[in-house]
Amino acid sequence: MMKRLLLLLLVSLVSVGALHAQDSTGARDRVRVILEFRPGARPGLVVLPGRGADSVRAILRRDLGYSDRFVMVPIGDPPGGARSGTEEASGINYQLYRTLGANLAVELVEAPGGVTARLYDVAGSRLRSQQTVAMPPTGDAGFRMEAHRLSDEIVRWATGTPGAAASRLLFVSAGQVFRIDSDGIGLTPLTPAGQTALSPVWSPDGSRFAFTQLGAGRGGVIVQSLASGAAFTAPGTGTALNITPSFSADGRTLAYAHSDENGTDVYIADIVERCCARRLTVGRFSDNLSPSFSPDGRRIAFVSTRTGPPQVYVMAADGTDPELLAPYDYGATGSSNAPEWSPDGANVVFHREVSGSPQLFLVDAAGRRVRQLTSAGRNEDPTWAPDGRHVAYVSDRSGRRQLWVIDIETGTVRQLSTPGAARLPAWSRRLGRTVLSPNP
C-alpha cells in the first residue's frame, strides 16, 4: 500500500510540474529545452512548494534547471501555494524528498521587502545556507534580473561557483540588434529597424555595447550606452568597413577589423580618450579579422588567411608574436572563424567547416588540444556564458537559424526561440550583483 501511495504521489507531482510552465506575466515560456542527462553525474534538486513568492519560484526553477548543475526533481505548487500539513508542523520532509531522488532542496519564504532563500542538504537532513534578499515588486523592470541573481547565488551555495542566469544576450535579426535575458524572455530592440547592424558585443560591465552600422558603402563601429542611448563612433572606424569589434577586459580598448583597398587588418583604439587607433596586423597578403581579447588583456585571438584558408591565430596584445592557435587537419576540416576566449582564459571556442558545414570547436589555449562540440546541422558564431561552461551559438537544426545553448560539460542543449532568423550572438558577463544580508 505504501509503495502504491508513493507511486501515485510521484505521478501527481510530475503532472503538476508539467503544467507549471508560465513566467511571472502569465505568458507561456518561449524557450524550448532539450535535456540529455547523464545518470549519477549531478545531484537531484527540488524547489519546494510554498506560500507566496510564486513568480520568484517559477524563475528559480527554470534557472536552476538551465544551469545544468542539477537533475531537477519536478514538483509543482499545489493550489493556494500551501505545503503539506506534515511539513507545516515539523519542517522539511527529508524522507519524502530523498525518496523522490533529491539531494538538495531550495525553499523560498516571503520576507519584508524581499524573500528568504534556504538551501537544504536533503541527504544530511540539515539546513545548509540561508540568506534574505531584497526584491523589487513583481511589475518592476528589475524584478526578473534580481530573481536571476538569486538563482546564481543558490548555484554558488550548492556548487561553489555561481550560475549564469543574471546575464543577457545580444543578437542580430533582420539587420537589427536585439537583447534577451539568458532564459529567452524580455526581447528588446536596441537599434532602429530599417538600418543594418552587425557584430554586436557587450562591454565588460554591461553598460554599453558596440556594433557595426552599415550605410553608404561603409561601416563604422558604434559604441552605445544601454541606459541613455548616447553613442559615438569608435576612433579609426569613420571610413571604409569596420567589423567584429571586441572590448578589452578593462573596457578601455576596442579591437576591430578594418577593411579597405589594402586588405583587412586588426586595429585597436582607446575608447576612453577616443583616440589613438593603431594597426596590429599587416594584411598585404592576407586578411585578419574577428579579434577577441583574452581575459587578462595580454593576448588577442583572431582569424587570418596568412597560410591559406581562414584559421584561428593568437598574438600579443601589441600585435607581436603571432602564431597558429588551433591546429587543423588538412582535408578533414576547412575554414575557421569567430574565436572567443572563455571567461577563465583557458579555452577559445570557434566554428570550423567540417564536410562543408560549420561546427563548434574548443581549443585548449595552453595545450592546443582541439575538441569538436557539435555535429548536427550548421552551427556557428559561438559566444561564452559568464559561467565558462555554456556557449550560445546559431544553428539551423530546428529548420531555421535560431539561438541555441550548449553545456560543454554534459552536451545538454536548449533552444532560445526568437521571432525571426538570428545571427551573431554575444553573451554578457554577469550583470550587477545580489546584495545579501545574513539572517540573525
Image: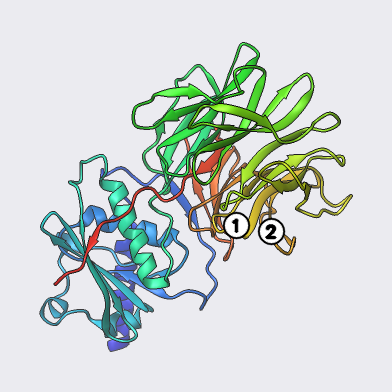
Q: SS at mark 1?
A: loop
Q: Does residue 125 sit above or below 38 in this rendering?
A: below
Asked whether the beta carbons under mark 2 and mark 1 sit within 8 Å of each other, the answer is yes
Q: Does residue 265 sit above or below 53 in this rendering?
A: above
The percent coordinates of residue 149 (x first, y second) are: 33, 55
Q: Does residue 417 sit above or below 72 in this rendering?
A: above
Label number found at residue 365? 2
Q: Amino acid at mark 1?
A: Gly
Q: Quadrant of residue 152?
A: bottom left
| 367 left or right of 286 in image | left
Residue at image x 38%, y 57%? 63
Q: Quadrant of the N terminus?
A: bottom left
The percent coordinates of residue 64 (x first, y second) are: 38, 62
Give the CA distance from mark 2 to mark 1. 8 Å
Q: SS at mark 2?
A: loop
Which residue is under mark 1?
345
| Frontmost residue, 277 versus 1 | 277
| Frontmost residue, 142 versus 296 | 296
Residue 419 visible? The answer is no
* Badge count: 2
| 207 left or right of 27 in image | right
